């Protein structure tokens, strides 16, 4: 029987490791946990090579795999995978208050929509804003007349 070269993990070992992470092929959390484990294995190989200048030996890699496939590490990987696959955060039940726009800060006045009754219009606030808009138009036309229109 031939020996496996250093740094090589036998495919049967990988199948066994995969079956520990995801006993069922439809187990999404187990498959993501296995992917996280593979990422950690590749990071181990890269770091080992960077520090020692050589690829990890079969014994070093086996020691890493034994520690990474312990029940505690398996549950940690599954917890991380469940967190990654978890439902998207829901909207808060109490939405943040809407910010006033800049023109509302300039013109002020009561809001056009009633905060406690969003389907009703606050006519006083609407008329106030229309009045302010009319004053702005009149002031603009007077300034244009004074500054840019020359007398005949």
Image (cartoon, rainbow, N blue to C red):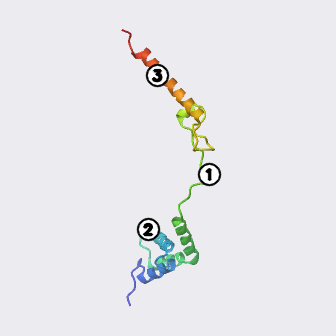
Q: Earlier in the sequence, mark 3 or mark 1?
A: 1
Secondary structure category for the residue under label 3 = helix
Q: Is residue 8 left or right of residue 77?
A: left
- How far apart are labels 2 and 1 at the CA level? 48 Å
The quarter holding residue 106 reads: top right
The numbered dot on residue 46 is 2
Q: Residue at x 52, y 69 (%)?
A: 81
The numbered dot on residue 94 is 1
Crowding near pointer 2: few (<14 within 10 Å), some, many (20+)?
A: some
Relative depth, front residue between 74 and 142: 142
Crowding near pointer 1: few (<14 within 10 Å), some, many (20+)?
A: few
Q: Residue at x 51, y 28 (%)?
A: 133
Q: Position of residue 61 (x, y in %)?
A: 47, 76
Relative depth, front residue between 152 and 116: 116
Relative depth, front residue between 48 and 74: 74
The numbered dot on residue 140 is 3
């Amino acid at each position: 029987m031939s020996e496996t070269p250093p740094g090589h993990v036998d495919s049967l070992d990988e199948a066994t490791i995969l079956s520990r992470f995801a006993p069922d092929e439809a187990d999404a959390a187990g498959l993501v946990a296995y992917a996280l484990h593979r990422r950690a294995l590749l990071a181990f190989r890269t770091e080992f090579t960077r520090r020692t200048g050589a690829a990890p030996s079969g014994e070093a890699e086996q020691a890493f795999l034994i520690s990474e496939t312990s029940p505690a590490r398996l549950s940690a990987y599954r917890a991380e995978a469940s967190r990654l696959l978890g439902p998207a955060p829901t909207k808060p039940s109490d939405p943040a208050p809407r910010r006033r726009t800049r023109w509302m800060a300039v013109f002020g006045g009561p809001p056009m929509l009633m905060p406690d009754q969003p389907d009703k219009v606050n006519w006083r606030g609407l008329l106030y804003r229309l009045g302010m808009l009319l004053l702005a138009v009149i002031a603009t036309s007077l300034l244009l007349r004074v500054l840019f229109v020359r007398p005949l």
